């Protein structure tokens, strides 16, 4: 099923979709583009490159309450945290979509599955948006990601740069349901198609084949002694990253009433591995940097068969000292004929 | 790279090479190019080979003084390239007794102000392929052609209202001083916010702070945040909750800013490091402005001997509350 | 942000947290009591060893967890039990008060007063006055933790 929404009807499309639940899309906010809930009057930024923070929080929110407790006399009452409503996630780039696949493996391909993640996933219709102009920070082609197709999405959208019209193509039953709408808004495509634009991203001369195997046994490699030095120890890289999925659990309240929530955590923080007795197996930034990059480049591939990076370029854009995953790959030898 | 930078780089490299190879310093903290022409990242140079990567251009924004805190554990004597703000950051750490003056050699680099890549892109309309600089102008080169813009319009926010481009403390001044600057618009945004009704000001900060990821990049990049244990990590009692609530964001940002009262050098590294561009410098500048108004003109980091305003008092001090 | 940050609710009574110096204002409160002066029960007194002990996070934490107004009461300048504690707090709390106002709080939400141990009447008057001012302002919602209501 293929439908077209003309540029002038886009605001109508947003309120139409928002009427069916929560609508999340890239919105221009101040100097940044954020993936957030749409409210009337927002400046939607479909033509922007990747959002400042990855849209992983659609399924894996920064904070999510999953249990409330209250003592009434001798009775302890427990209740579930949040109700889930239907969500449409509009404008997910193919790299971020690929990252969803990686999060799925962690949260769904195990027993027991992560119910919170599963429920959010099930209630969300994902509309991917084909890229037409990659940012200089993008390097998804290194990972074999096609920036104009999105196999895992319910709907794939193509934006026509000239007219600003949007072509929506359903890829799943859920996607078809989404496109069954007001005919005056969603018109039939009638064989029209927006040819996929030629999109080429940077590749930094990276050579990844064999890198994961090569990293085995290099835990004490001298490269780590240099690589970590410039790291400031903040959590920017992990929080903007679409494939980082660590969380922490904390309580709010007191002994009589309160709630338990989970929230993002970062392996870059000193407290991440701090144990109750005071011992910390990753006492300095060196161990933390090593953990982060080995997780992406060796541990994840060992378990799931591919490197946990999609080349979205957010760490290249946001790290205050430019210590990003490409720096790490190069420092660890995953480079050929570097062109700078 | 502009001719001027090349000549200056040669001068810098010659000076530090002599000291590094001669053993006067064991490590040099400088900058090297990252992946892109608009990124210059910290360089930790131990030998001649490392020094080949040394760079000096309009993108050397990272404040290197902070790295001394860690590197002095591993190296006996360290050389650091310092711009105006970096030198004041050094004074700040010195005043907090975090580093020993005699173990550091400071190479002063009067600074032209660093450029902001996102501004270059915004002004050019597309991502520029490169730039040329001459006589206070920048030529932006794009696929569509060239565009010439005044350099001042492309500076990082932190550099726009810089008062001291020249290092205030150094062992060797390597380049020609640029002289003190004026910053008539330094408090412009602060004043504009002060004039809003309280509820609108709250709404403003509520919206700006709602973007906060609490990645703590602002804290980590900051040269006055040198506490071994930050209030954020303290857990007996636990001050900073982890939840992404407005209330927790306010707590973090107000306390972070307040811990810098009288100590913040207004280098703006916090705002530069912020991935979602929260206007943190306005919080810092509000405190600087108020302390200056109430307790006399003071710029942190100018002189490590001068006592910061919150470490001292006068019996007849004014107060900002109605009881004097 | 809620439509009205300080919307009044029927039956609402303000909660005022007063941090009182052990050596002066707290004793001033005692004197108010023994002199049979009354002051509003809206004020909850927390004793601190000196106004200089006041960590600004105390104030913010109070606002997070339900306070509608916060008062710090210490010794008159020159009278500090520890000689200089209140001179330091005068500077600190002055700049902190301005920062809190810059964040969007109304000036009356956070105040500082000097009350000696012999000023029982002033203690009662100030408590009456701040409660009145907060009543006029209405409930505080700024910086209030959204979860606080559900756990109280």
Image (cartoon, coloured by chain):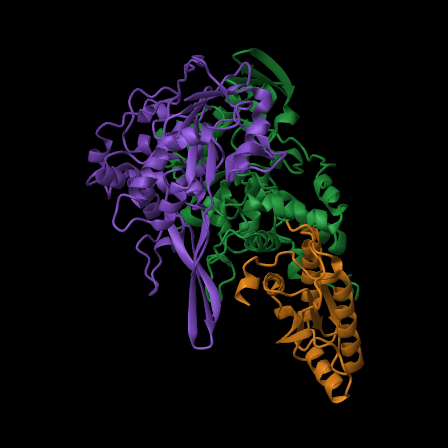
Report which colour depicts chain C: orange
Q: Quick check: B23 left or right of C18?
A: left
Q: Residue furthest top?
A: B145
Chain letter for purple, please: A
Q: Nearer the viewer, residue A69 or A173?
A: A173
Q: Quick check: B302 left or right of B293?
A: left
Residue A294 higher or lower than B142, as above or below: below
Q: Quick check: B322 left or right of A291?
A: right
Q: Quick check: A338 left or right of B101?
A: left
Give the percent coordinates (x, y) of residue A282.
32, 52
Residue A242 higher or lower than A191, as above or below: below
Query: Do we see residue A34 in this rendering?
Result: no
Residue plotted at (60% across, 65% down) = C58
The quarter of the rendered structure image containing the C terminus of chain B is: bottom right
Give the percent coordinates (x, y) of residue B79.
46, 40
Chain letter for green, please: B
Give the percent coordinates (x, y) of residue C2.
65, 51
Query: Do we see residue A306 in this rendering?
Result: yes
Give the percent coordinates (x, y) of residue A217.
19, 41
Residue plotted at (47% across, 36% down) = A88
Q: Nearer the viewer, residue B30 or A334?
A: A334
- Disc tally is 0
Q: Quadrant of residue B162?
A: top right
């Amino acid at each position: 099923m293929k439908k077209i929404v003309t540029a002038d009807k886009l605001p109508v499309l947003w309120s139409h979709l928002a009427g069916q639940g929560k609508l999340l899309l890239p919105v221009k906010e101040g100097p940044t583009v954020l993936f957030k809930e749409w409210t009337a009057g927002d400046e939607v930024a479909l033509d922007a490159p990747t959002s400042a923070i990855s849209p992983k929080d659609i399924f894996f929110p920064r904070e999510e309450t999953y249990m409330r407790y209250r003592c009434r006399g001798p009775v302890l009452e427990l209740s579930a945290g949040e109700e889930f409503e239907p969500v449409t996630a509009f404008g997910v780039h193919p790299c971020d979509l690929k990252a969803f696949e990686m999060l799925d493996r962690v949260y769904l391909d195990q027993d027991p599955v992560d119910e919170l993640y599963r429920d959010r996933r099930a209630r969300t219709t994902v509309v991917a948006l084909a890229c037409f102009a990659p940012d200089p920070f993008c390097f998804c082609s290194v990972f074999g990601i096609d920036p104009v197709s999105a196999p895992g999405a319910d709907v794939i959208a193509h934006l026509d740069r000239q007219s600003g019209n949007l072509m929506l193509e359903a890829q799943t039953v859920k996607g078809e349901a989404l496109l069954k709408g007001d005919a005056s808004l969603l018109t039939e495509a009638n064989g029209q198609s927006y040819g996929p634009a030629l999109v080429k991203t940077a590749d930094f001369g990276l050579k990844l084949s064999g890198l994961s195997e090569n990293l085995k046994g290099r835990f004490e490699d001298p490269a780590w002694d240099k690589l970590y030095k410039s790291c400031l120890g903040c959590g920017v890289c992990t929080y903007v990253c679409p494939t980082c999925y660590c969380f922490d659990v904390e309580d709010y309240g007191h002994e009589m009433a309160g709630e338990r929530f989970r929230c993002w955590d970062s392996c870059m923080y000193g407290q991440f591995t701090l144990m109750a007795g005071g011992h910390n197996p990753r006492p300095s930034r060196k161990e933390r940097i090593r953990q982060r990059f080995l997780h992406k480049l060796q541990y994840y591939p060992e378990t799931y068969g591919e490197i946990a990076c999609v080349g979205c370029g957010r760490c290249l854009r946001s790290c205050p000292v430019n210590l990003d995953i490409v720096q790490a790959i190069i420092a660890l030898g995953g480079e050929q004929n570097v062109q700078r | 790279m502009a001719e001027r930078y090349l000549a200056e780089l040669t001068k810098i490299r010659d000076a530090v090479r002599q000291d590094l190879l001669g053993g006067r310093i064991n490590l040099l903290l400088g900058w090297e190019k990252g992946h892109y022409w608009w990124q210059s990242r910290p360089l930790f140079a131990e030998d001649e080979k490392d020094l080949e990567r040394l760079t000096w251009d309009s993108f050397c924004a990272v404040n290197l003084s902070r790295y001394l805190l860690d590197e002095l554990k591993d190296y006996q004597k360290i050389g650091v390239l310092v711009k105006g703000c970096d030198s004041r950051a050094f004074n700040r750490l010195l005043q907090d007794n975090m580093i020993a003056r005699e173990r550091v050699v400071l190479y002063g680099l009067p600074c032209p102000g660093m450029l902001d890549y996102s501004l270059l892109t915004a002004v050019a309309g597309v991502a520029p392929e490169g730039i040329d600089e001459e006589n206070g102008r920048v030529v932006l080169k794009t696929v569509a052609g060239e565009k010439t813009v005044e350099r001042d319009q492309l500076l990082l926010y932190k550099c726009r209202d810089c008062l001291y481009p020249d290092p205030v403390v150094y062992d060797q001044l390597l380049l020609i001083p640029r002289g003190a600057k004026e910053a008539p618009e330094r408090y412009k945004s602060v004043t504009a916010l002060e004039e809003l009704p309280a509820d609108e000001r709250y709404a403003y900060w509520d919206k700006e702070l709602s973007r906060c990821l609490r990645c703590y990049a602002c804290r980590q990049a900051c040269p006055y945040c040198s506490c071994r244990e930050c209030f954020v990590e303290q857990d007996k009692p636990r001050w900073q909750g982890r939840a992404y609530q407005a209330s927790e964001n306010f707590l973090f940002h107000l306390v972070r800013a307040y811990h810098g009262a009288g100590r913040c050098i207004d280098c703006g590294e916090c705002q530069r490091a912020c991935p979602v561009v929260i206007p943190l410098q306005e919080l810092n500048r509000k405190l600087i402005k108020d302390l200056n108004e109430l307790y006399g003109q003071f710029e942190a980091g100018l002189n490590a001997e001068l006592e910061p305003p919150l470490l001292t008092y006068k019996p007849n001090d004014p107060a900002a509350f109605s009881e004097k | 942000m809620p439509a009205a940050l300080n919307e009044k609710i029927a039956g609402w009574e303000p909660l005022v947290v007063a941090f009182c110096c052990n050596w002066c204002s707290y004793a001033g409160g005692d004197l108010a009591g023994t002199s049979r002066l009354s002051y509003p029960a809206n004020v909850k007194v927390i004793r601190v060893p000196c106004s200089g002990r006041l960590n600004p996070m105390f104030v913010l934490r109070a606002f997070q967890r339900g306070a509608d107004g916060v008062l710090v009461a210490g010794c008159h300048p020159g009278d500090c039990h520890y000689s200089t504690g209140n001179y330091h707090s005068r500077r600190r709390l002055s700049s902190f008060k301005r920062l809190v106002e810059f964040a969007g709080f109304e000036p009356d939400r956070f105040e500082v007063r000097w009350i000696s141990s012999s000023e029982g009447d002033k203690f009662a008057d100030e408590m009456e006055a701040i409660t009145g001012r907060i009543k006029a302002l209405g409930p505080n919602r700024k910086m209030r933790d959204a979860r606080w209501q559900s756990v109280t």
